[in-house]
């Protein structure tokens, strides 16, 4: 596939409208809104579908997967409270859009995808756009233990339970953001590691993600 990277007035205008829409939906973190306003989401779409890129919807990216809805990306990013230099593990690279948002927020991102086609696409597209996270291909339901510990872990697919192995890869004071539930709907869960075996769990709003598939998942 040939990639087309043109960011013209129509797409820039649509992106501004999207930011206003997310603000109205309750996203308050100015840095997250700025990042959404900066990353050209249409670069993750075939040109035929550029008119869909700034709608607040998830969209198919091939292999039965989706680029997450902008509201969901903003919501998870806000929960992470990203600080410059945070070492963040992202499980489910997908299109790479969320990865770029985290990098705009100053994170050093480790991102893993299990679908080889998606992985191959992101290792080309993201560096071309100027983003160079650490890419991994494989089952992220076990985390990426060889590079642990992380300040934050974000899971962008719906998990049936919180994998214990992920919790163990958080630094003390580190945070996991993970959607947990059944195939139809998941609650967004945040888990703060406060000590070796001490965790604080909060359940938030309901979402619908594609499933996290793997050894510690569906
Ligand atoms: N934030 C991404 C985006 O904006 O494109 C979302 C991608 S999609 C909702 C979730 C991704 O998780 C899919 O690409 C899927 O293949 C991937 N995934 C599912 N189970 C996985 C696993 N065990 N390890 C790594 N990736 C996984």
Image: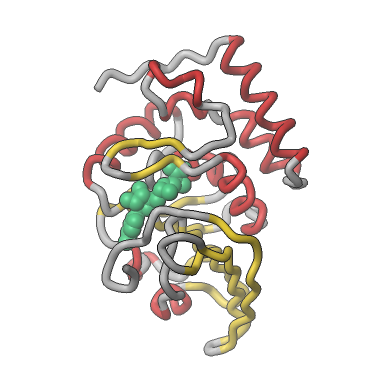
Residue sticking out furthest to the top: 9
Measuring 46% from the left and 70% from the top, which residue is drawn there? 149
Residue 7 seen: yes
Image height of 126 relative to 92, above or below: above
Residue sticking out furthest to the bottom: 197
Measuring 29% from the left and 35% from the top, which residue is drawn there? 121
Q: Quadrant of residue 74?
A: top right
Measuring 70% from the left and 38% from the top, which residue is drawn there? 22
Quadrant (top left/top right/bottom left/bottom right) for the N terminus: top left
| Foreground of the two, 197 or 182 | 182
Image height of 197 relative to 203, above or below: below
Residue sticking out furthest to the front: 184
Q: Quadrant of residue 18?
A: top right
Residue 26 in the image: state x and y as whole percent.
76, 46
| Foreground of the two, 54 or 43 | 54
Measuring 65% from the left and 54% from the top, which residue is drawn there? 83
Residue 102 in the image: state x and y as whole percent.
55, 46
Residue 130 in the image: state x and y as whole percent.
45, 30
Residue sticking out furthest to the left: 116
Image height of 135 relative to 129, above or below: below
Residue 4 in the image: state x and y as whole percent.
38, 16
Left or right relative to 123: residue 27: right
Quadrant (top left/top right/bottom left/bottom right) for the C terminus: bottom left
């Amino acid at each position: 596939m040939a990639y087309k990277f043109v960011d013209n007035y129509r797409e820039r205008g649509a992106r501004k409208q999207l930011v206003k829409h997310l603000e109205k939906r309750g996203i308050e973190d100015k840095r997250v809104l700025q990042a959404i306003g900066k990353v050209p989401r249409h670069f993750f779409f075939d040109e035929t579908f550029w008119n869909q890129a700034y709608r607040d919807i998830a969209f198919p990216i091939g292999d039965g997967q989706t680029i997450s809805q902008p509201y969901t990306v903003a919501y998870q990013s806000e929960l992470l409270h990203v600080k410059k230099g945070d070492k963040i593990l992202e499980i489910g690279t997908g299109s790479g859009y969320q990865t770029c948002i985290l990098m705009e927020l100053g994170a050093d991102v480790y991102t893993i995808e299990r679908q080889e086609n998606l992985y191959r696409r992101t290792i080309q597209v993201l560096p071309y756009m100027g983003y160079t996270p650490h890419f991994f291909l494989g089952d992220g339901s076990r985390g990426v233990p060889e590079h642990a510990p992380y300040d934050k872990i974000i899971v962008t697919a719906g998990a049936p339970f919180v994998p214990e192995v992920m919790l163990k890869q958080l630094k003390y004071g580190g945070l996991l953001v993970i959607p947990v539930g059944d195939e139809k709907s998941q609650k967004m869960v945040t888990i703060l590691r406060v000590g070796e075996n001490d965790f604080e769990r909060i359940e938030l709003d309901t979402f619908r993600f594609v499933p996290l598939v793997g050894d510690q998942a569906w």
